[in-house]
Amino acid sequence: MGAKELRGHIDICTPDQIAGWALGDNGQIPEIVIEADSKYICSLRPDIFRTDLNAVAGFRHRFAPTLTNAVSIRAYFADTGKDLANSPFDLKYRLETPSEKDVAWRRAVELPPASEMKLVAGSGSADSFVNQGTRMARVVAGEIVDFFGEFRKDLRILDFGCGVGRVLLPISRTHAARWFACDVNEGAIAYLKSAVPEIQSARTNFTPPLPFEDNAFDCVYSISIWTHLSMDMQLPWLAEIRRILRPGGLALISTSGGHVVDVRQRRGDMGWGELNSESLVKAGYLYRPYSSEALPGIDGSYGLAAHDPNFIQRVWSQIMPVLTTRVRAIEAMQDLNVLTKV
Ligand SMILES: C[S@@+](CC[C@H](N)C(=O)[O-])C[C@H]1O[C@@H](n2cnc3c(N)ncnc32)[C@H](O)[C@@H]1O
């Protein structure tokens, strides 16, 4: 069985259990080996019928209570030694499902169309969009409180590249402030204008400048934008964020670090197969444009980027001081860079 013929994914991993799926292209049921902190735990074969895959491909294994202190769980194909996607799974970074109370904001707003939620949240379910947004909003709000000492309602805060408001909706429904949003996507802005008319949302251009005055904002945050920007675009946009921030203001910008590069490599994302976190440390910054066949209409200035925190310190700090990089703070994937304007 060749490596390319086997596919699989870890869906759930907690100190109690691991669950996911694995499948051979011809319907073979592959053997999976599970390790915790590099120690063998068990081998198994999928034995659960998965309707989404229309095959016996699902597996679930309950760990013994002694596993509670393990950090890294690996699942790989016995035949090839190749990891399932999402493996190794780092328990330190596992995501909690927000409580009913945490997601109560969703009842106060009409959520975007499912197709739009799917574009950013992957699975397309409203729950994923709501849960991801709620977790990310908590991280962003936590940084704002840490920086300003409190969340004040006179703070002017911009979501740059807001999309259909995955973060903007939960954060603005749960924290009073003067909220602003902008994105190049006209449809996303039309949705926000109708769903949350009190937020000043603007459709903006692919290149600077933004239609905002110098020093207009106390805080600008931007999630999953620099993860797509080419070198040509990332520094001009950083300089533009600096222009619209007031001195002493806060910028929160997410980037993809070594962990994401390793995930892209394991997933076999186009152009990332030869790269890993070590290549990122060496290069500082990596970028691969989306192919125009995969995404018609996309040009070479939009693709997948990755930044090493040392590169960010060295290069971005020339534009704005970088106070810190919170590794994997966003959904246990992207890093969150904390910058200020002096
Ligand atoms: C991956 S989505 C993230 C959306 C949102 N921040 C979130 O986390 O759900 C990237 C967004 O960036 C927007 N975008 C890309 N380039 C932009 C630019 N130069 N100015 C403003 N928005 C941009 C896209 O239209 C898209 O909505």
Image (cartoon, rainbow, N blue to C red):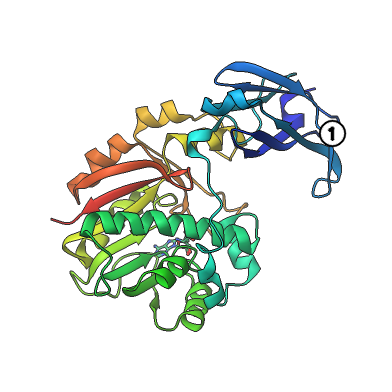
Is ligand 1 less than 8 Å from the beta carbon at label 1? no
Quadrant, the N terminus:
top right
Q: Residue at x 59, y 64 (%)?
A: 117
Mark 1 residue crowding within 10 angstroms, few (<14) / some (14–19) / many (20+) = some
Can you name the residue that lies furthest to the top here? 39
178 left or right of 331 in image: left
153 left or right of 9 in image: left
Amino acid type indicated by mark 1: Asp
- Please determine whether, in this image, residue 109 is positioned above or below residue 135: below
Q: Position of residue 26 (x, y in %)?
A: 86, 33
Q: Position of residue 73 (x, y in %)?
A: 58, 27
* Residue 102 shows in the view: yes
- Residue that carries the numbered disc 1 in the rendered image: 47
Q: Residue at x 55, y 38 (%)?
A: 264
Kindly indicate the quadrant of the structure image that contains residue 160.
bottom left
Q: Which residue is at the front of the view, 8 or 66?
A: 66
- Please determine whether, in this image, residue 260 is positioned above or below residue 68: below
307 left or right of 311 in image: right
- Please determine whether, in this image, residue 182 is positioned above or below residue 25: below
Q: Which residue is at the front of the view, 75 or 68?
A: 68
Quadrant, the C terminus:
bottom left
Q: Residue at x 66, y 25 (%)?
A: 64
* Residue 225 shows in the view: no
Q: Residue at x 31, y 73 (%)?
A: 177
Q: Ligand 1, what quadrant?
A: bottom left
Q: Which residue is at the front of the view, 6 or 292?
A: 6
Kindly indicate the quadrant of the structure image that contains residue 67.
top right
Q: Position of residue 103 (x, y in %)?
A: 53, 64
Q: Position of residue 13 (x, y in %)?
A: 62, 36
